Amino acid sequence: MARAWHLEKRPSGLPVASDFALRDIDMPALADGEIRVRNLWLSVDPYMRGRMNDAKSYADPFALGEPMTGGAVGEVVESNAEGFAPGDHVLHMHGWRDEAVLPARGVQKLPPIDVPPQAFLGQFGMPGMTAYFGLLRVAEAKPGDTVFVSAAAGAVGSTVVQIAKARGMTVIGSAGGTRKCDWVRSLGADRVIDYKGEASVLRQLHAAAPEGIDVYFDNVGGEHLDAAFATARQGARFAICGMIDIYNSGAATELRYIARTIAARIRIQGFLVSDWMGEAGDFYRDMAAMLADGKLQREETVIEGIENMPQAFLGLFEGSNMGKMLVRV
Amino acid sequence: MARAWHLEKRPSGLPVASDFALRDIDMPALADGEIRVRNLWLSVDPYMRGRMNDAKSYADPFALGEPMTGGAVGEVVESNAEGFAPGDHVLHMHGWRDEAVLPARGVQKLPPIDVPPQAFLGQFGMPGMTAYFGLLRVAEAKPGDTVFVSAAAGAVGSTVVQIAKARGMTVIGSAGGTRKCDWVRSLGADRVIDYKGEASVLRQLHAAAPEGIDVYFDNVGGEHLDAAFATARQGARFAICGMIDIYNSGAATELRYIARTIAARIRIQGFLVSDWMGEAGDFYRDMAAMLADGKLQREETVIEGIENMPQAFLGLFEGSNMGKMLVRV
């Protein structure tokens, strides 16, 4: 019998285990154009927190009492759709469950790049594309720029660091704790800020970038964003990708330096990776080249068993992942 | 004997009278290329508050114990410079004084537009250009857009309202008090928000723009900016011109809705009018056409006497001006 995680209650603040329930689901017979997929890897991502609220946003809210959805990689076990055969490895959005019957038109075969299949949920998937398009297109980062990226040990941030280094930028990454900071440094970051350290993020950023920053890639919001305002050089560009600091609390963000937007002519641009899907070819090409050149490292934090998926999700907000957080079914 | 306002102390918070002193200044004989100007009109502008701090920003700080500077319109009374003759009316930056000796190369003759000379310190000068370039170039406002502008009864805001209406936009202006709100409505604003009213700016903006806003022209920051985040439609553009709310206090800005930057793909761009001087010809052409079509109203709040200039300046922060705040020497 297949099982899926259902949203039982809308969380208030940080979600708790009882907000979710793992329940049996029916697996209908295949209609025309459908396939059945046995999921191997399930993705948990910070943006899913927003979908647990009953508020219209870029992704529809999860329905109460219904299975949740999200990125997944699996193997086709039955096909009633042209072009898909049992044994194919595919990427799709019917995650949070161990098995799915779904229309083949929402399903993507894994691109021919020599990485393990779960990488297409991370560095070669949505988080990697977020890093690539956010840095190069949204922030228009150029060789010689000084780039500050928060959550630099995460799936998105760690890819930002490596793309930026490969393109001749100076990179300052922020992460929490010595182990993560060491890893970010090993990825090539020129300087690393430990946001759990004694000195404030602002003080550390001033020290790390005495001449200021040209680009800020924001995954966090809050104190990191304010430090970016304080240190922005003329014409700085901020790509606003996430604000994990406030996803649960919904607290107000206090900014002491936002007025520097005027004098420094800062451009701040929010974006969603889905806006850039039409240019995914550029992403795969450039990332495959970096991989071939040995310029790409990848880390995964793997939680075993679908039973533990809520804990994997909650771990994102505790910073318990290094690289991409994944659940192996 | 000529007199000039000197900065005696750097204000902490809202400036007080004793931060300034009106003192005699020497009027040297004219060197080659210099002119002597008797000032008729002096400008006070919110940005001058920043120059009273000892902090590097887009304009250099005023020097302690030295005459302050700023926009002024005057009449040439003596000339040692080609192209300038006694009787010429000119615009220059040696304000805060009744007479000035200055190099002619920093001086502009008044453009041939049929408005009183002091208009070149307001709607046909720096504040007008700020409105024009901020709305049309920075925010890229287009016909059909819904535009929200704060401080809509000020020199900049009142011009934003009228340019936006002339270009087929829907305009929501915010101002303080019934008299100002009535005036903003008379300029053509479709809806007006009284920020001194009982309902919050956010509640009023939701009611005024139930479908949301496409453009926010920010002169104020703070609560107005947060309301703009809350109501921004997909692809909204914010032109950040000023944040008068915090020029004196330096307080942190509390934003509850800034995370909407991501989902709504908001673009926020700080700017200075000086960046657009190369395109001033477009401004004069379009504004002269609006004037000829009877589509431009102008208001001035005139304080008489150079002795009262600090009070005029402080009045900007009390919202005591409708339209451009000016001092008549």
Image (tube, coloured by chain):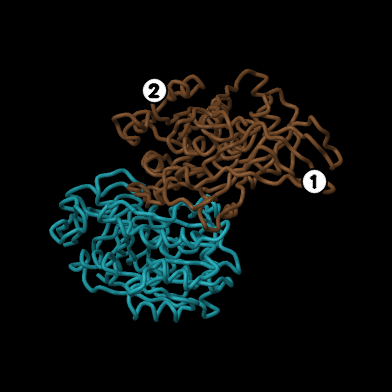
Chain colours: A brown, B cyan
> Can residue A177 be seen?
yes
Residue type beneath disc 1: Ala
Q: Quadrant of the C terminus of chain B?
A: bottom left
Within-10-Å neighbours for mark 2: few <14, some 14–19, many 20+: some
Which chain's residue wears label 2? A
Residue under label 1: A29
Q: Position of residue B226 (x, y in %)?
A: 41, 59
> Residue at the location (35% across, 48% down)?
A255
The residue at which mark 2 appears reads as A178
- Residue B275 in view in this figure: no
Q: Nearer the viewer, residue A40 or B2?
A: A40
Report whether A221 appears left or right of B136.
left
The answer to whether residue A65 is above or below residue A35 is: below
Residue B187: x percent and y percent? 46, 78
B302 left or right of A176 in image = left
Location of the N terminus of chain B (image quadrant): bottom left
Q: Tell me the crowding category of disc 1: few under 14, some 14 to 19, or many 20 or more residues within 10 angstroms, Cα based.
A: few
- B85 is higher (above) or lower (below) than B181: above
Give the residue at x 66% y 37%.
A98
- Left/right placement of residue A87 relative to residue B74 reads right
Task: Tell me the chain of label 1.
Answer: A
Residue sitting at the far right: A82
Q: Which residue is at the front of the view, A318 or B128?
A: A318
Q: CA distance from mark 1 to mark 2?
A: 51 Å
Please tell me whether mark 1 or mark 2 is closer to you in this view.
1
